[in-house]
Image (tube, rainbow, N blue to C red):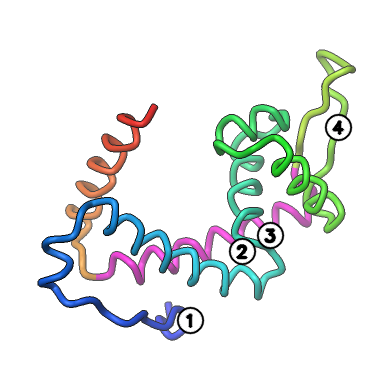
Amino acid sequence: MDPSHFPPPESLPDSMLERAPFAHLFSVIHRQSSIAMTRRLRESGVTFGQFFSIRYIFEHEGCSQEQLSHRLRMDKGAVARTVHALEEDGYVQRLPDPADRRRVILSLTERGKEQYRTIVRISDEWEDVLLRDLSPEERQELRRLLIKVVHTLN
């Protein structure tokens, strides 16, 4: 992976980071990730918000918009607009639920599945850049700890 796809942000001094609240550290990581991912995803024709929807629909084929909204913790209106845009771009199709014809389920089109593979590659590349100084064991431990923090929010 070519790290030049993700130019480094200005670094903050360690003395500042060591005293920073966790919320600030999370914010820095989120902000830099959003900037880097938005730039790369734009090249493939997808927004950062659409990225999460495509991933969720791929991993939960046949989900409803309501499930998508709930799982991604997004406003129902924002999800409706995102799904509409994905449908317009030919990535998603809305289909009648075979079990309940009144309900609509979401499915990726072949174009959407191709886009899924592209965005996963971009995401993996960014993750490699972001975590390049961590060993596989440290990455696993970081994931475990972050999941634990996320669970406190539920």
Q: Main secondary structure of the magenta part?
A: helix
* Range of magenta residues: 108-132
Q: Amino acid at mark 4?
A: Leu
**Distance from Cα at disc 4 to Cα at disc 1:** 37 Å
Element type where label 3 sits in the image? helix
Please name the residue shown 86% across and 32% down the image. Answer: 95
Element type where label 4 sits in the image? strand
Please name the residue shown 27% across and 70% down the image. Answer: 132
Pointer 1 or 3: first along the chain: 1
Q: Check the image and name the residue furthest to the bottom.
A: 4
Vertical comparison of 77 with 19: above or below: above
**Which residue bears the numbered disc 2?**
118
Please name the residue shown 32% across and 55% down the image. Answer: 26
In depth, the one of 4 and 137 nearer the eye is 4
**Which residue bears the numbered disc 1?**
5
Where residue 14 appears, as percent x and y from the top left, is 13, 73
**Which residue bears the numbered disc 3?**
115
**Which residue bears the numbered disc 4?**
95
